[in-house]
Amino acid sequence: MVQRAAKVAEFTGTSGSLSVFSDANEVGAWAKDAVSFSVGNGLIVGKSNGTLAPLSEITRAETAVVILRLLQKAELVDVRSTT
């Protein structure tokens, strides 16, 4: 879904390597391209323990962060701190 949204936003981005994550082998073959795209563009940065946790459910907050990052990368929103 993120790749499709990026295409609509005319954001091409790049693919990244999943090898830096200790659980990269748990990413399904069907999802590898999409996850590589999300990692390569900084939409997904993984957990603090160096994993992606691809078998875990994503929270609403994590989903919101991915969407916000995509909108920022596509230059559709400009979120700046006022402090």
Image (cartoon, helix red, strand yellow):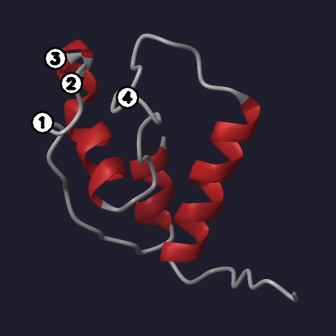
Q: Neighbour class for label 4 at 10 Å: few (<14), some, many (≥20)?
A: many
Q: Tag on residue 19? A: 1
- Tell me the residue that label 4 is attached to: 52
Image coordinates for residue 16, horizontal then vertical, percent: 19, 53
**SS of the residue at dot 3?**
helix
- Tell me the residue that label 2 is attached to: 24
Q: Is residue 83 left or right of residue 3?
A: right
Q: Tag on residue 8? A: none
Residue type beneath disc 3: Asn
**SS of the residue at dot 2?**
helix
Using the numbered discs, state the Cα–Cα distance from disc 4 to disc 3 in whole angstroms.
10 Å
Residue drawn at (16%, 17%) of the image:
25
Residue drawn at (63%, 80%) of the image:
76
Quadrant of residue 21 within the rendered picture: top left
**SS of the residue at dot 1?**
loop
Q: Are marks 3 and 2 in contact (CB under 8 Å)?
A: yes
Using the numbered discs, state the Cα–Cα distance from disc 3 to disc 1 in whole angstroms.
9 Å
Q: Are marks 3 and 1 in contact (CB under 8 Å)?
A: no
Q: Neighbour class for label 2 at 10 Å: few (<14), some, many (≥20)?
A: some
Q: Nearer the viewer, residue 3 or 16?
A: 16
Counting residues from the start of the chain, the first of labels 2 and 4 encountered is 2
Counting residues from the start of the chain, the first of labels 2 and 1 encountered is 1
